[in-house]
Amino acid sequence: MKGFILLVFAIIAAVLVVGGAVAYQVMNEVNIGADDADSGLVGKLIDKVSNVESSESSNSDSEGSIMDTVNDIVKEEVKFNAQNGEGYYREVTYKDGGFRQFDTETGELIGSSYESDQDKLPSME
């Protein structure tokens, strides 16, 4: 019986050690607690959002900051790509009523309601 209890404790300890290592790796990748936002998942997300022009910055004389664009987001959801019959896309809806659709695997813009984005969309031919 003592052997069984020791085995259970050893398994719990192993799970805690592995879980801690995974959590540490994820925190490093996401840059939690890091001062440098240019690398990792958060930096990549900010780069993606900053590369796509917001409708407000394209209609105004001054450039909007990345935080203005992020604050304009009303809803973000992942949907099944029924038109393609496979895969998923991320749809971002903005407070002005417009939307942008991004491929979940590549992060590329695949759909948009904004006129300024139409030349950035993939060709349908």
Image (cartoon, rainbow, N blue to C red):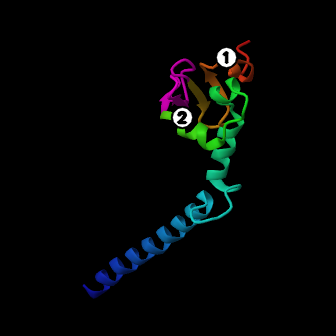
- In the picture, residue 31 is in which quadrant? bottom right
Three-letter residue code for mark 2: Asp
Residue nearest the viewer, comparing 23 with 9:
23
* Residue 96 in the figure: left or right of residue 36: left
Between residues 43 and 3, which one lies in front from this camera angle?
Answer: 43
Q: Amino acid at mark 1?
A: Glu
Separation of marks 2 and 1 at Cα, in angstroms? 18 Å
N-term-proximal mark, 2 vs 1: 2
Q: Where's the N terminus, which quadrant?
A: bottom left
Toward the left, the furthest residue is 1
Q: Is 74 contained in the magenta span?
A: no
Q: Position of residue 106 (x, y in %)?
A: 66, 37
Extent of the magenta region: 77-98
- Give the quadrant of residue 69: top right
113 up-or-down from 28: above or below: above
Look at 59% across and 26% down and name the residue there.
100
Q: Residues within 10 Å of mark 1 (few under 14, many from 20)?
A: few
Q: Where does label 1 land, which residue? A: 115
Helix, strand or loop at mark 2:
loop
Is residue 89 one of those drawn in magenta? yes
- Mark 2 crowd level (few <14, some 14–19, many ≥20, 10 Å Cα): some
Quadrant assignment for the C terminus: top right
**Residue pictured at 55% horizontal, 68% vertical:** 24
Say which mark, if any, is on residue 72: 2
In the foreground, 57 or 9? 57
Could you tell me residue 63's position as x and y percent? 71, 35
